[in-house]
Image (spheres, helix red, strand yellow):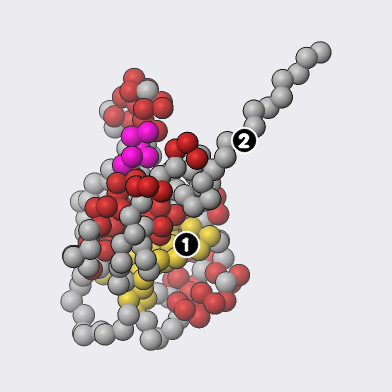
């Protein structure tokens, strides 16, 4: 009986983790931001084709990507999140304080924490980590619309991690050309739509 060998695995870019033939690195900017961005990514998200948390951190000079479900495994980050010398806030949708709410003068360096994963996984990350629950929570304005045309959003105004990070930095650092962060994001979505074909896309996504 003849058996066929499985196709060899496609080589991947070690930086963006995309197949080398579809590497996005040439489109990813390198913006010199002032606000430190920490993306805590649920492990199930790291191999997702649309890995927007990783894409966001690659485009920023001051950003880190932490892949974990439990911060207890990363004591160095627990200390950083609790450091009173920093103004550390969790960007999370809901009835929290607006990102640009008036507050007393605070000259501490600012760190913004984002949770990267599906809505359910992001809530799980928050539930499992008391250190995240203890952070001051801020949110973006209501009524924002996602450019993420290939994922069903849990509620109106929900944004992908890269969109949320870009919008937050647009507010905090107006001089930063954050629109450049979304160039590889848009290119990736366009490529996914072209791969599935316009007919399938129109039937399954465009009508929503």
Residue 142 in view in this figure: yes
For the record, the magenta segment spans 186-191
Measured as percent of width and height from the top left, residue 199 is found at 34, 20
Q: Is residue 80 magenta?
A: no
Crowding at mark 1 (Cα within 10 Å: few <14, some 14-19, many 20+): some
Residue at image point 51% right, 46% down: 13
Residue at the extreme right: 1
Measured as percent of width and height from the top left, residue 85 is found at 38, 86
Measured as percent of width and height from the top left, residue 182 is found at 30, 49
Residue 11 or residue 173, whichever sits in front: 11
Measured as percent of width and height from the top left, residue 143 is found at 20, 51
Q: Is residue 163 left or right of residue 78?
A: left
Q: Quadrant of residue 184?
A: top left
Residue at image point 41% right, 26% down: 196
User: In the structure shown, which secondary structural element does the residue marked by tag 1 occupy?
Assistant: strand
On-image quarter of the N terminus: top right
Residue at image point 53% right, 65% down: 128
Crowding at mark 2 (Cα within 10 Å: few <14, some 14-19, many 20+): few
Q: Is residue 59 left or right of residue 70?
A: left
Residue at the extreme top: 1
The total number of labels drawn is 2
> Main SS type for the magenta part?
helix
* Label 1 or label 2, whichever comes before in sequence order: 2
When the figure is inspected, residue 56 is found, relative to residue 172, above or below; the finding is above
User: In the structure shown, which secondary structural element does the residue marked by tag 2 occupy?
Assistant: loop
Residue 102 or residue 10, whichever sits in front: 10
Q: Is residue 187 magenta?
A: yes
Circle 1 sits on which residue?
A: 65
On-image quarter of the C terminus: top left
Residue 92 or residue 64, whichever sits in front: 64
- In the rendered structure, find residue 9 and report the number of the disc placed on it: 2
């Amino acid at each position: 009986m003849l058996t066929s060998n499985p196709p060899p695995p496609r080589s991947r870019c070690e930086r963006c983790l995309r197949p080398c033939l579809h590497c996005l690195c040439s489109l990813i900017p390198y913006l010199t931001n002032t606000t430190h961005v920490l993306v805590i990514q649920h492990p199930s998200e790291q191999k997702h084709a649309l890995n927007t948390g990783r894409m966001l951190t690659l485009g920023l000079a001051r950003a880190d990507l932490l892949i974990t479900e439990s911060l207890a495994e990363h004591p160095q980050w627990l200390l950083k999140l609790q450091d009173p010398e920093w103004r550390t806030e969790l960007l999370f949708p809901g009835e929290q304080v607006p990102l640009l709410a008036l507050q007393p003068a605070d000259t501490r360096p600012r760190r913004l924490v984002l949770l990267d994963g599906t809505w359910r996984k992001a809530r799980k990350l928050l539930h499992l980590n008391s250190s995240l629950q203890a952070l001051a929570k801020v949110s973006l304005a209501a009524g924002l619309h996602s450019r993420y045309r290939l994922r069903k959003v849990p509620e109106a105004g929900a944004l992908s991690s890269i969109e949320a990070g870009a919008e937050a930095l647009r507010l905090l650092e107006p001089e930063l050309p954050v629109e450049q962060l979304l160039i590889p994001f848009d290119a990736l979505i366009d490529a996914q739509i072209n791969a599935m074909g316009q007919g399938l896309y129109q039937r399954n996504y465009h009508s929503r």
